[in-house]
Amino acid sequence: DADGEPTGQFAETAMALIFDAVGAMRQETKASLDSGAQLARLAGVTTHSDLAVRILGRVFDEYSAHAASGELPVRVVISPHMHETFRRLSNAEALELVQSIRGRCNDRFFLGPLKWISDGSIQGFTAALNWPGYCNGSEDGHLLLDRATIIESVLPFHRAGFQVAIHANGDRAIDETLLALRDVVASDPRDDHRHRIEHAQMMSPEQLDAAAELGIALNFFSNHLFYWGDIHYTTTMGPERAMRSNPAKSALLKGIKISIHSDAPVTPVAPLFTMWCAVNRVTRTGMILGEGERLTPLEALRAVTLGAAELMHLEHELGSITVGKLADFTVLAQNPLTTDPMEIKNIPVVGTVLAGVPT
């Protein structure tokens, strides 16, 4: 207003205007990378996937050099934030930049899937939902990328052999993403592309069928079940949709490759807690949110190890203790496969080993 006081909110991609004004987010500096890697190590992580990295400018040069240096106690897999990239570069320039990152990579620093964001968050009422929308009557969120825009943006990178990961929480955003990826894959068929949908929280049975047919992998936000499950039941999705949210079990039964995640810093990095959420599906109030979608402890353990590696095309290097792979593993005080499922989140992490060396 005339006094310089804010009169509204910036949401989703509009927040980039703020970042431009105040400078790059500090999460990508060397000191912050060090502290983040230590938090991940203490939680039992050996490979950290960073799914929204801004790849333009000096900050990324510092980030990539430090991640590749071997000084961190974790390996780092980055997913370039393509919204940010396309704000400043043409398709051809963006493709050239992404290809150049491969030259910086080694066995400590990997280029993962390229990241697009098609909607917002369910709890923030910015995810794009189909009818009947939010059960409390809120507007139906923000569809940031429709089918045509996804095709135009993603197709050059698909043709160049890259994997893509598209954030889609709401069922409308998931529809647009699946339709776009169907066209992308059909235009230039490629075996085992493993394009991904991130979060995929409101996947319907029909959408799961489409993902299975297309070979789309799914990375579920299982922590949501605990942190916002009650709100989803009463305020955002309503009971029926909340009960089948994050349908990891159904995805597995349809032969879909899956992983589960924390979406840190939205929720803390803690693979054992993420496993606990997927196995128990318990909300803050103790409600079981969709018993039929519970994973077994073994399925959840695989989802945060070999399943996660598969979603990054790194299963030949990471994800299991196997001759010929990188010697990374986590030492736990108890066996999560035999512990009471409700106690999985409380299992102490004794330590981690990276490349055969205790960290």
Image (tube, helix red, strand yellow):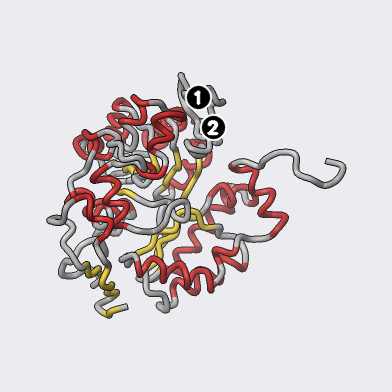
x then y, percent, for residue 9: 67, 40
Confirm or deny contact between disc 1 and disc 2 (CB under 8 A).
Answer: no
Name the residue located 22 percent from the left edge and 54 percent from the top edge. 343
Number of other residues with Cα within 10 Å of mark 1, as a class: few under 14, some 14 to 19, many 20 or more? few
| Quadrant in the picture for residue 22 | bottom right
* Residue 175 visible somewhere in the drawing: no
* Residue, disc 2: 143
Q: Is residue 103 left or right of residue 256?
A: right
Secondary structure state at the residue bearing disc 2: loop
Mark number, residue 136: 1
Residue found at the very far left of the displayed protein: 338
Name the residue located 38 percent from the left edge and 62 percent from the top edge. 48
Q: Nearer the viewer, residue 60 or 240?
A: 240
| Quadrant in the picture for residue 319 | bottom left
Mark 1–mark 2 distance (CA, rounded to whole Å): 19 Å
| Quadrant in the picture for residue 279 | top left
x then y, percent, for residue 237: 42, 28
Q: Nearer the viewer, residue 209 or 243?
A: 243
